């Protein structure tokens, strides 16, 4: 079988390389995905971290202020 002059590997000065990895997530992009019970804790920890971030960025705490105001008003009525 005759070799084509274009098939000589010594003439190839280029190469192609590609790789890709799936990022680890405890969920899937598949709409029919059923979460695995072993990832329940991981998902809950992600939610807790998200709530912690929101609370850390708060300047005031309206619920706490409302409760304190109610307690202070009850104290005024007892006097």
Image: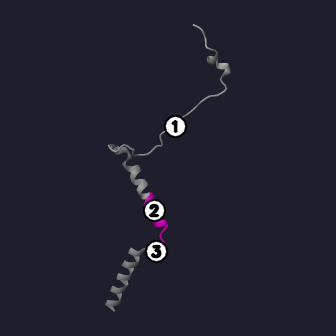
Instruction: Assign a secondary structure to mark 3.
Output: loop
Neighbor class of circle 2 (other Cα within 10 Å; few <14, some 14-19, many 20+) is few
Residue sticking out furthest to the bottom: 79
Q: Which residues are magenta?
A: 49-60
Neighbor class of circle 3 (other Cα within 10 Å; few <14, some 14-19, many 20+) is few
Q: As rendered, which of 20 and 3 lies closer to the eye?
A: 3
Circles 2 and 1 in contact, beta carbons < 8 Å: no
Task: Determine which residue is flagged by label 3.
Answer: 60
Task: Determine which residue is flagged by label 2.
Answer: 52
Residue 8 higher or lower than 73, as above or below: above
Residue 37 higher or lower than 69, as above or below: above
Instruction: Assign a secondary structure to mark 1.
Output: loop
Q: Nearer the viewer, mark 1 or mark 3?
A: 1
Image quadrant assignment for residue 9: top right
Question: Where does residue 66 sit, x and y in percent of width and height?
Answer: 37, 78
Question: Where does residue 13 sit, x and y in percent of width and height?
Answer: 67, 26
N-terminal of the two: label 2 or label 1? 1
Image quadrant assignment for residue 6: top right
Question: Where does residue 57 sit, x and y in percent of width and height?
Answer: 49, 67
Neighbor class of circle 1 (other Cα within 10 Å; few <14, some 14-19, many 20+) is few
Question: Where does residue 11 sit, x and y in percent of width and height?
Answer: 67, 21
């Amino acid at each position: 079988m005759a070799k084509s002059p274009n098939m000589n590997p010594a003439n190839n000065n280029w190469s192609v390389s590609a790789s890709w990895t799936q990022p680890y997530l405890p969920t899937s992009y598949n709409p029919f995905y059923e979460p695995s019970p072993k990832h329940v804790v991981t998902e809950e920890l992600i939610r807790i971290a998200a709530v912690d971030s929101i609370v850390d960025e708060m300047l005031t705490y309206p619920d706490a202020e409302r409760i304190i105001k109610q307690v202070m008003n009850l104290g005024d009525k007892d006097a």
